[in-house]
Amino acid sequence: MQILLFIAGLGLLLLAMRMLEQALGKFGEGRLRQALQVFTRSPLHGIVLGIVTTAVLQSSTVVGLITMAFVGAGVLPLRNAIGVILGCNLGTTFTGWLVTYLGFTLNLDAHYSVFLGLAALATVLTKDGSRYQDAARFVFAYGLLLFGLALMKDSISFVIDLVDVSKLQSLPLPVYFVFGALLTALIQSSAATVAITLSALSAGILELDSAAALVIGADLGTTNTVIVSSLSGAIIKRRIALVHFIFNFVTDVLALLCLPLLLTLITDIYGIVDPLFALVAIHSSFNLFGIVLFFPFLDVLQKFIERRIPLPQAHNLLITQVSPDVPAAAMHALEQDVRNLLIACVLLNGWRLQIPGERDVAARRLLLPDTVDAAYKELKQWENQLTEYILKVQRKNLQPLEATRLQQLLVCIRDCLYSTKAVKDMTKDLQTFRQLGSKPVAVFLDALLQVVAQIYSDALALLESNANASLEQIKGILDQVRETHSRSNTAIYDLIEKGDFARDRASTALNINRELLFSGHSLVNAIEHCLLPGEQARTVSEILNLRD
């Protein structure tokens, strides 16, 4: 019966940890996202932020997920993200201090029923989804944690009935190290392993050195979940997982080898006599020493990680590295990818029209495959990927401005592909006219494409600039598109009147000009929705009479 109670207590403890993570995540995720963008200017800032946020949120998983998302979106450099991950390892040890103080020193676990009852009542009486209900769920989770801890403390004696404690205590330390790693990998919670170890230490089943070896092993066991989840994940996820594993493996092996020194440091120098607090102090200390050891070599570690897991040679969308579960990072990645899609569409249009430009050729080689057909196919794939990703982000809890921005980006994606398709559809007609051999027609085409080249150059300048675009700049590009269309129509009719242009080619020539107008309008509308805020973009569309 005791073993069943222990298992039940462990189950309640794991559930409570998950509920705490969810409750604290609702309170702190938004602030964490802001902090990652503002307070990670260096690896040292990242370490401090990782320690504080993990201790407060009680979840290295949440911190790690958001960190990976911001690295993938290009907001957070990998070097600073490594600092956050190192800090997370120390921040997770705060749970051990909390459990030791509340569950063993204050014995609040004896009052778990009060926490559970009052929190349950508050949950029922408060409004669904309100902050008060979230706070009530947080208290309920803590009550559940204390309940599970109480069951584990009261039932841990089953070990004494099953095994000879003296033989158990005589096992070599590496056995406890391996057992801690395997147990944590199995239950996927180092905090639960620490709670089990504290219960065994409190009951006299384990000595301090054996308990410390078990906790050191648990620290290594936490890497299992990260490694397994990264095997089929994005590159940045594999990089972060490798950082996590290297840090934990080196730190934990050194901690095991230096365990006698750690015990002396804690008991003789720190003067911590209580074995429970000595255990959690050891847990925090070897993680702190690991940070101190790794900090001077962060550049070396970053270069090793980047060499070991390189980025692909071909251009990949940033959204493939960012989870849609972190809207702030997802929005940043989308902004970059949609802008790159627009730039790629302009470059592809110039390529199809055979508009020269050494700079454009160099930029094109960075973004696009070797042929126009392959390039168009890839842009269509980008369109599908971006659209599907936006639909995933739209299912998350978004701010009104974020939801509006996503609609703008959808319009932008749609219209820039419209622009590219229009140029694609008229390319054969344009090639036919080039082959006519008529000098007046050649002069006409050269003049037309020179103006189109200028339009594309202005569009690229806007898209590649870090400065904010203005209404006047976008209207200027639109005016060029319309004036070019009007002048070209006049030129076509003049060529017909002079006999330099066969009348049976007139409809094809006018169709080319119409497709260029449609392509230009679509491009301007896409640029407008990409570069201008929502209200301005809608106003511009109405004033300029563009398509919705």
Image: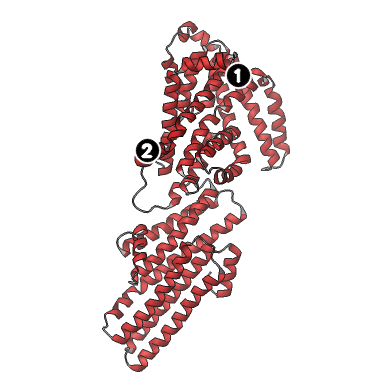
Identify whether 63 is placed above or below 166: below
Nearer the observer: mark 2 or 1; the answer is 2
The reply, left or right, for residue 334 in relation to residue 94 is left
Tell me where residue 182 appears, x and y as whole percent: 43, 23
Quadrant of res 356: bottom left
Residue to which mark 1 is pinned: 151
* Pick the front one: 545 or 277: 277
Three-letter amino acid code of the residue under disc 2: Phe
Residue 66: image location, x then y, percent: 52, 42
Q: Give the residue at x 57% y 24%.
A: 96
Q: Amino acid at mark 1?
A: Leu
**Does residue 455 appear anywhere in the picture?**
yes
Q: Is residue 417 left or right of residue 409?
A: left
Front residue of this view, candidates 381 and 56: 56
Earlier-in-chain disc, 2 versus 1 = 1
Spot occupied by residue 377 in the image (x, y as percentages of width and height): 35, 61
* Element under disc 1: helix
Query: Label 1 crowding class (10 Å Cα cut-off): few <14, some 14-19, many 20+?
Result: many
- The residue furthest front is 296
- Horizontal and vertical percent position of residue 547: 52, 71
Q: Quadrant of residue 449?
A: bottom left
Q: Is residue 349 above or below residue 133?
A: below
Q: Which residue is mark 2?
A: 304
Foreground: 274 or 196?
274
For the N terminus, the image quarter is top right
In the structure shown, which secondary structural element does the residue marked by tag 2 occupy? Answer: helix
**Residue 45 vs residue 103, the one in the foreground:** 45
